[in-house]
Image (tube, helix red, strand yellow):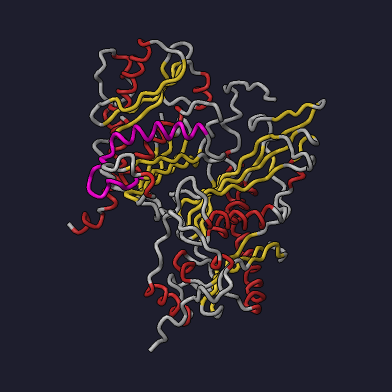
Amino acid sequence: MVGPIASLSQLNRADGSASYKCPATGYSILGAVNAPIELPARRDALKPEEATVEVFVKPGTTTAGVGERYAEGILRSALGKIVLGREKGFPRRGLVITLTIVGGENVERGDSYLTILPALLHAALLAMVSASVPLSMTFSATLLGVTKSGDIVRDPSPTAAKAAVSLHAFAFSSKNHLLLNESVGRFEFDTWELVRERALSICQGATTSTDGDVTMGEGTASASLNGFIRETVEDQIYSDYAYKLDSI
Amino acid sequence: MRPARAKWPKKESISDPRAGAVRPPSTMSKEAQLSIAERDFILEALREDLRLDGRQHDDYRPLDISFGEEYGHVKLQLGKTHIIVRISAEVTKPREDRPFDGLFNINLELSAMGSPAWENGRTNDIEAYATNTLDRIIRHSNALDTESLCILKGVSCWAIRADVHIVDYDGNITDAACIAIMAGLQHFRRPDAVVRDGRVIVYGVEQRVPVALNITHKPLSVTFNTFNDSKHVIVDATLKEEQAAEGDLVIGINSAGDICYLSKYAGAPADAMAIVNKTNVAWEKVKEINAAVDKVLQADLAKRAKIGMADESRAENDRLIQIE
């Protein structure tokens, strides 16, 4: 299976930016973060002691609609939990995350937005890291589909996702907290538990499960999504500090 | 000693249609203003025929165009201005008053990605102005033949949509967007559709070779900015140069030299001779850019032809059911 491709800080104007491409689902996301940024006075009344997290999802070939607003809501609550909005300089300021879907099929009106959620989450996280937003932890997300025959498929393509009985999007923090759990379709608790374990092993690369065949094929820890996020950031830091390395 | 601030654009004295109107104080964040020193530096340098990045007056920044995996997905970089254009097509009903015409729309929405000064989900002056200019140059000049988009009179037609994403903003978005849209339209392939017994059948990309759009001519916009009482006129200004400029002039012209748009929207009055001279410059530039776009386009299409439909035409693939 081809892993995702990501790179950090490509844009000049935004404070932080990242691009993320998932070859399995075909989605390519460009994320930009501006933080801390001055917000018009009307908005800071809600929580003056914290930063306001704003997420904007911009589809590639249509105008944003209800589906995007729904996805923005999910992203805002998930990302809001890991941002340290009380750090110096952040209270009463805004954290504006803009995510543009630059490649892949559009999510059709009325279709589930879950399929693109992991890609959006990763792009947002990497862009926040690039913008040096204080975070309590990082996370990784994955999408799993359950087929008619009960097989669990990782990162189903848009057509496979349409045929799936149920879809599950999970996000696990670097400390193994379950950050996000969104599901659509019909499924039982047992199925969900299986899917959750599989998702955890994909994200963490951990072999915590007693059920051997679930964790097989995911490979070593570096093949995990958390490892991927870490490596991407490490690569960026390595190139950013190349001048220091050369002078040693 | 140089005359201090003598060349400061006199906002009140010029017939700026926007300057006279009292506008409500906007809560919108603004692009950081140019400092007086920076402005003076740019103007002074121009007097010595120099630009900040060492270009000549009639030089564009380096132009880099690449295409994505899908048809009509253009990534364009003009200096530090970075634009992504995606062209898409869908079947809709034509307008009542124009049953023979398909639809074509250009959609430009500024987001905080391009510049922190732009707020998400809110329109601003730049957006309205750029959309209008692009509409006038590409749409109203009929660069895309909308009649060829008709499938069945009054019943169904193609709606072509160009989405412009300003990903990085460093001035001159109209020219960059114009080049990207025209490149996208030439690169795009729509699915083939036929009418059989009064029914419209749209063939998937796997079933029939998709069709190129019918482009009648290739107009591009060339934006000039004037400085020092229109003594210095430069092409393709960066954001800083735009901020220091006293006025702008947009010329929409195609490779044959037909002018399809000319606008002196705001700012200080420009010299009439400058406009005449710069029209010739614009023509040269459009020919140059169109040739560059053509080269990239041919290279990409040749690459696609080489790969061909190898993946799609494998025997082990699922048989697709006809979509109607």
Where is residue B295 shown, x and y percent of the image? 60, 56
Residue A93 lies in the magenta stretch:
yes
B148 sits left or right of A222 in the view: right
Camera sees residue B58: no
Count of marks placed on residues: 0
Camera sees residue B97: yes
Stretch in magenta: A66-95
Front position in the image: B50 or A153: B50
Where is residue B256 shown, x and y percent of the image? 72, 64
Image point (43%, 49%), residue name: B113
Image point (65%, 79%), residue name: B273
- Can you say which quadrant of the picture contains the N terminus of chain A? top left
Image point (57%, 54%), residue name: B128
Q: Up-down: is B231 above or below B289?
A: below
Residue at the extreme left of the image, as rendered: A248
Q: Up-down: is B156 above or below B110?
A: above
Front position in the image: B83 or B100: B100
Image point (41%, 77%), residue name: B40
Where is residue B321 shown, x and y percent of the image? 65, 21
Where is residue B270 shown, x and y percent of the image? 60, 76
Residue at the extreme bottom of the image, as rendered: B1
Residue B319 lies in the magenta stretch:
no
Q: Up-down: is B124 above or below B157?
A: below
Front position in the image: B34 or B162: B34
- Can you say which quadrant of the picture contains the C terminus of chain A? bottom left
